[in-house]
Amino acid sequence: MKKISLILFFFIMGLFTCITAQDKTAVDNLSNYAPKDTLQGWKRSGIAGITFGQTSLNNWVAGGNNTVSGNFILNASANYLKNKWFWDNNLSAEYGMVYSSSTDWQKATDKLNLTSIAGYKVSSRWAAAFLLNFYSQFSKGYNYPDKTHHISNLLAPAYLDAALGLSYKQSDYALFLSPLAQRAIFVLDDSLSNIGAFGVKEGKKLRFETGAYVLASTSQTISENLKLIASLNLFTPYNEDFGNIDTNLNLLLSYKLNKLLTATLNTTLRYYDDEIKKVQFKEILGLGLTYNF
C-alpha cells in the first residue's frame, strides 16, 4: 500500500505541475474566470438531497430479501473574499440506513467533514494560507451482523488537521500544499480508547502526528444537468511511517433528470493505516430529490 500511496502522491504533484503550466492560458482567458475569482464578499453554493431504494420479493424462487434504503447527502460551501484576503469553507455530510427483512436496520454510510482555509493572496493564483480540516461520523458503527460491540462512534475516531502552507486556485480547481501539518487523532469513547483503537495508546484518547498534507478539490458544472464535486486529502507523518500516506478520495456526481428527480453517484476511496490496513471503498448510486443552491 505504501508504494501505491506514493504513486498517487506523485501523480497529484504531476497533475499540479500541468495545471501550473496552463496558468498562462488561464490568464489569457481571464474574462471567463474573473467573475468567480474576484467576486467580493460571500459566495455560497452546494447540493442537498435524499435518495431512496427499495426491493420487494414475493415467492421469488431465486431467493433474496426485501430491502429499503435511504441516504441523506449535503455538500455546502461558503467562501468569503475581501481584497487579497479569503476564507473558504466546505461542509460535507452523509448519513444512510438500509433495512433488510433478514437483518433489520443497518447503517450504510456516515460522514461528517468540515474544511476551512483562510489566507492572503501573494499573486493572482497563489496565497499563503492556513487550513483546518475535521473528519468524524455521527453515530456508532458496527461490524454487522454483530450489533453488540461497536467499532466506531462519534468522535471515535475524529481527525483534526491544522496546516500552514500555500494555496493555489484556478477557476473551479483548488490545491493546498503544506510541508508542516499537525494531526490530532481523537478517540473519545472509553471502550475503544481502552483497547488502543485507531492508533492511540491503550487508555489514551488523543494522539498527535506531524507531517505533510495535500488537499485537492474541484466543484464544477459539467453540463446543464450534470454537477461534479470531488476532493482528495493526503497526509504522511514524519516518523517511521513516512511514505505510508493516509488517503481520502471523495467524488459526488449529480444528474438532474427532471424538476423532481435526480440521480446521484457518491463514492469514497479511503486508506488510513490506523483504521484498517486495507483500502476501503464505498459507492452509493441513488435516485431521489436534490436541491442545488
Image (spheres, rainbow, N blue to C red):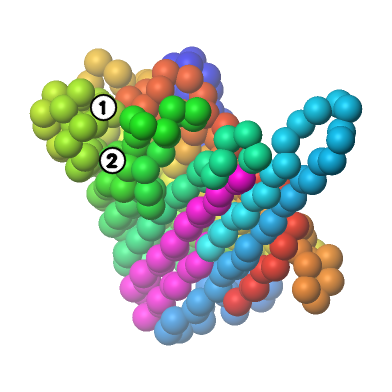
Label 2: element kind:
loop
Label 1: element kind:
helix
* 103 vs 211, nearest the viewer: 103
Callout 2 touching callout 1 (CB < 8 Å): yes
* 164 vs 43, nearest the viewer: 43
Does 32 sit above or below residue 107? below
Q: Is residue 180 found inside the magenta-colored segment of the image?
A: no
Q: Earlier in the sequence, mark 2 or mark 1?
A: 2
Q: Is residue 97 found inside the magenta-colored segment of the image?
A: yes
Furthest toward the bottom, the residue is 41
Circle 2 sits on which residue? 156
Image coordinates of residue 49 in percent, x first then y, are 62, 65
Residue type at the position of mark 2: Ala
Does 114 sit above or below residue 76? above
Does 91 sit above or below residue 236? below
Magenta-colored span: 75-99
Distance between mark 2 and mark 1 Cα atoms: 9 Å
Asked which quadrant contains residue 156, the reply is top left
Q: Residues within 10 Å of mark 2 (few under 14, many from 20)?
A: many
User: Which quadrant of the rendered structure holds the C terminus?
Assistant: bottom right
